[in-house]
Image (tube, helix red, strand yellow):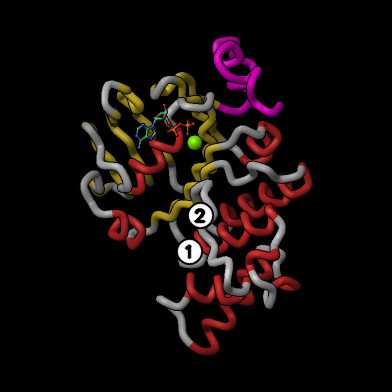
Amino acid sequence: MTLLELRGLNKHFGGLHVTNSVDLALQPGEIHCLIGPNGAGKSTLFRLILGEYSVGSGHIYFSGEEITTLKSFARIRRGLSVKFQVPGVFKGLSVRQNLEIALQSRHRGAVLAQEIDRLLAFLALEAEQAQSASNLSHGQKQWLEIGMAIALKPRLLLLDEPTAGMSPEETHMTGEMVRRLNAEGVTVLAIEHDMAFVRQVAQRVTVLHLGQVFAQGSIEEIVTDERVAAIYLGQAHA
Ligand code: ADP
Ligand code: MG
């Protein structure tokens, strides 16, 4: 069964048609990358999926059930999680306290401590756990945010440019995290510009252009598609 399905999604901002009849189906267990020029409507699509924006028209299904008009918290409860580009960590708290906040709605006591330890190890942040989140490097902050987004074991994780501003090494480590998460059963939809990352993780790629699905296929099909190169790949970080 399809895990996430977008059917004929439309969204306008004033006269701007930002999401134009988008159809997209994610299979459970896949890592899918969403690429496209700046302003293509990628982040808007995430906000529609999460329910931060209401759709103009069209339908969103999650695990076979329509969620088009559900509030964000109800979508999150069903297993959707999003890491946006804007920093969402509590800077005045330690790394460990940040993860505790993300986990405490579901765990208490010894299990809570164990789950925090598990996440710290996963994120390679064990040595930084007592530090203030504000002292982390840019890349480590991104990982902490990923940790907060995956704390409650979502079925679908949406990542909006998770490697923006990262070094090639940090980008690679992020890719390995995404692959390990996926091996644990999490389906991933990631917006990315870094083509090394897309190559590392993507099983399928969708290109969005002017709010529309412009192309879809394997990474090889996408990078050898001259139409895609004409609108986008020249701008991407190959
Ligand atoms: P991308 O993430 O692909 O760069 P966005 O989804 O952020 O693109 O933006 C797509 C277009 O929608 C842009 O022209 C942007 O200015 C516009 N847009 C996004 N959010 C809003 C909003 N809340 N109000 C008005 N215009 C918006
Ligand atoms: Mg964006």
Check the image and report above or below for 53 versus 195.
Answer: below
The residue segment tinted magenta is 218-238
Residue 1 is left or right of residue 183, and the answer is left
**Residue 156 part of the magenta segment:** no
Amino acid tagged 1: Lys
Q: Which residue is mark 2?
A: 186
Check the image and report above or below for 148 versus 39.
Answer: below
As rendered, which of 202 and 194 lies closer to the eye?
A: 194
Is residue 146 among the parts visible in the rendering?
Answer: yes
What secondary structure prevails in the magenta region?
helix
**Mark 1 packing: few (<14 Cα in 10 Å), some, or many (20+)?**
some
- Name the residue at 25% across, 41% down: 54
Contact? badges 1 and 2 (CB < 8 Å): yes
Tell me the quarter of the picture where residue 73 sits: bottom left
Given the current orientation, which residue lies at the most extreme bottom position? 109
Q: Which residue is mark 1?
A: 153
Amino acid tagged 2: Val
Which of the image's four quarters has the C terminus? top right
x, y percent for residue 34: 51, 33
